[in-house]
Image (cartoon, helix red, strand yellow):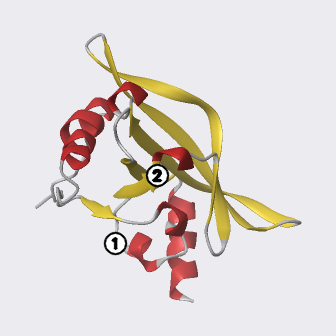
């Protein structure tokens, strides 16, 4: 029997999950855990759950903390490219920022195949809020050998 997969569209992530979390910080979804953005490190055991290939997290932060780099204990996430606009019909509802994970510290930095998409509400929804929630989707690029190597690394 195949297990059910959580495969929301970008628009659903914003409208069905992030908006609800912003309205009620106690809102939870079975497929989305809460985590600290600066602690989402691919070397952590949370990314070791069998054949699972994508992980979703609610992350809280102050609005002024919108960042281009997030440091973890063994590396850092850094923004790549331009933010993508997310629409519901013709209405802009949010943004998607792409990040890639680099392991190590200068001068020995290694780019990995770990990616993160950070989803945030469109700024006009945030004018009166002190804190915001984002949803982070963390995944390993479609390379089966990388998954095998990562799983072996976690078992060390």
The residue that label 2 is drawn on is 62
Distance between mark 2 and mark 1 Cα atoms: 33 Å
Is 152 located above or below residue 123 in the figure? below
| Quadrant in which residue 15 is drawn | top left
Q: Is residue 5 visible?
A: yes
* On screen, residue 55 above or below 123: below
Look at the image and tell me in which quarter the N terminus lies: bottom left
Q: Quadrant of residue 91?
A: top left
Residue found 17% across the figure and 56% down from its top: 27
Q: Secondary structure at mark 2?
A: strand
* Marks 2 & 1, CB-CB < 8 Å contact: no
- Category of crowding for the residue at label 2, using alpha-carbon neighbours closer than 10 angstroms: few (below 14), some (14–19), many (at least 20): few
Q: In the image, 72: left or right of 138?
A: right
Residue at x 16%, y 59% (from the top left corner): 3
Q: Is residue 54 visible?
A: no
Work out which residue is located at the far left of the displayed protein and give it: 1
94 above or below 111? above
Q: Nearer the viewer, residue 129 or 5?
A: 129
Within-10-Å neighbours for mark 1: few <14, some 14–19, many 20+:
few
Q: Seen in the image, is 15 located left or right of residue 68?
A: left
Q: Which residue is mark 1?
A: 50
- In percent of width and height, residue 19 lies at 24, 39
How many numbered discs? 2
Q: Position of residue 94 (x, y in %)?
A: 38, 29
Q: Which of the two residues, 3 or 80, is positioned nearer the viewer here?
A: 80
Q: Which quadrant is the C terminus positioned in?
A: bottom right
- On residue 92, the disc is none
Front residue (pair 91, 51): 91
Q: Identify which residue is drawn at 18% across, 58% down.
A: 28
Mark before the other along the chain sequence, 2 or 1: 1
Q: Residue at x 39, y 57 (%)?
A: 59
Q: Residue furthest top?
A: 90
């Amino acid at each position: 029997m195949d297990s059910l997969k959580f495969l929301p569209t970008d628009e659903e992530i914003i409208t069905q999950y992030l908006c609800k979390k912003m309205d009620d910080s106690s809102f939870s979804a079975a497929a989305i855990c809460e985590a600290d953005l600066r602690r989402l490190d691919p070397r952590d055991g949370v990314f070791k759950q069998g054949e699972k290939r994508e992980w979703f997290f609610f992350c809280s932060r102050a609005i002024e903390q919108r960042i281009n780099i997030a440091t973890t204990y063994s590396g850092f996430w850094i923004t790549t490219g331009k933010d993508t606009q997310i629409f519901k019909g013709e209405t802009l509802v949010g943004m998607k920022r792409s990040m890639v994970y680099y392991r190590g510290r200068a001068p020995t930095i290694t780019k990995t195949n770990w990616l993160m998409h950070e989803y945030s509400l469109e700024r006009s929804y945030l004018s009166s809020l002190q804190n915001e929630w984002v949803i982070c989707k963390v995944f390993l690029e479609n390379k089966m050998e990388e998954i095998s190597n990562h799983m072996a690394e976690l078992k060390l």
